[in-house]
């Protein structure tokens, strides 16, 4: 007997490729890019997202610089960016709307870059999806407050304080 077809009003959407230099030490993982990020082809492309403001405070990377310069400066600090989810169906940008997630091969990424010693998970959704993968790499993974503008539980100052955990774990340049 045939199984019924799964229907969704959202079309599958492909995420962004990883941003990394040759020897990243910290991997920051989101869940999946927002619609604005996907349109801009930039991680944390929503100007209301606190991510770049936090990076400006922690690493003096001006959040108004062009994206390629901001990401280059992150790579100089040996910070990589990616998402747990490679593609999914989702209407809007909310993580709660993610359906049918397909995960990036994070095990292979961590094997390719053994220099990574910290995975910083941007929000509880990224943390939940990451831990579902049962990655066996000997890398510390910490769930940090989401930088999303939807996360009103923490102020920007509180988010910065929690995200400070990554500062001493990367190259000082």
Image (cartoon, helix red, strand yellow):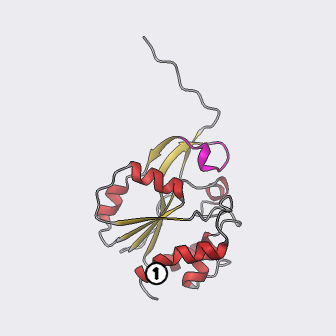
- From the viewer's perspective, tell me whether residue 120 is left or right of residue 59: left
Q: Is residue 17 visible?
A: yes
> What residue is at 47 percent from the left and 56 percent from the top?
127
Can you name the residue that lies furthest to the top here?
1
Magenta region includes residue 95: yes
Q: Where 170 falls versus 124 (above or below)?
A: below
Q: Please tell me whether mark 1 sits on a helix, a strand or a loop.
A: helix
Q: Is residue 158 above or below residue 12?
A: below
User: Where residue 162 sits in the image (x, y, percent)?
Assistant: 54, 73
Could you tell me residue 64's position as x and y percent? 68, 78
What is the crowding at mark 1: few (fewer than 14 residues within 10 Å), some, or many (at least 20)? some
Between 118 and 79, the one nearer to me in the picture: 118
Q: Position of residue 62 (x, y in %)?
A: 63, 82
- Quarter that holds the N terminus: top left
Identity of the residue drawn at 55% across and 53% down = 32
Most foreground residue, 20 or 98: 98
Extreme-bottom residue of the structure: 173
Corner quadrant of residue 11: top right
Q: Quadrant of residue 56?
A: bottom right
Q: Is residue 133 magenta?
A: no
Circle count: 1
Decide which of 132, 33 is in the foreground and name it. 132
Q: Is residue 97 left or right of residue 77?
A: right
Name the quadrant containing residue 123: bottom right
- Residues drawn in magenta: 91-99
| Residue 16 on image: x %, y % | 52, 56
* Residue 31 seen: no
Residue at 50% in and 56% down: 126
The residue singled out by tag 1 in the image is: 76
């Amino acid at each position: 007997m045939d199984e019924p077809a799964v229907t969704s009003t959202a079309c599958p959407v492909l995420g962004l490729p990883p941003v990394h230099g040759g020897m990243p030490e910290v991997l920051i993982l989101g869940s999946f890019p927002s619609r604005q990020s996907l349109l801009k082809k930039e991680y944390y492309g929503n100007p209301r997202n606190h991510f770049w403001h936090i990076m400006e405070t922690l690493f003096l990377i001006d959040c108004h610089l062009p994206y390629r310069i901001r990401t280059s400066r992150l790579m100089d600090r040996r910070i990589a960016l990616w998402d747990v989810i490679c593609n999914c169906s989702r209407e809007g940008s909310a993580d709660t709307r993610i359906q049918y997630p397909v995960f990036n091969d994070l095990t292979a990424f961590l094997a390719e870059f053994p220099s990574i010693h910290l995975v910083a998970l941007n929000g509880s959704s990224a943390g939940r999806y990451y831990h579902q993968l049962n990655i066996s790499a000997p890398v510390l993974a910490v769930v940090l407050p989401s930088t999303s503008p939807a996360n009103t539980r923490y102020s920007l100052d509180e988010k910065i304080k929690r995200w400070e955990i990554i500062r001493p774990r990367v190259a000082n340049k």
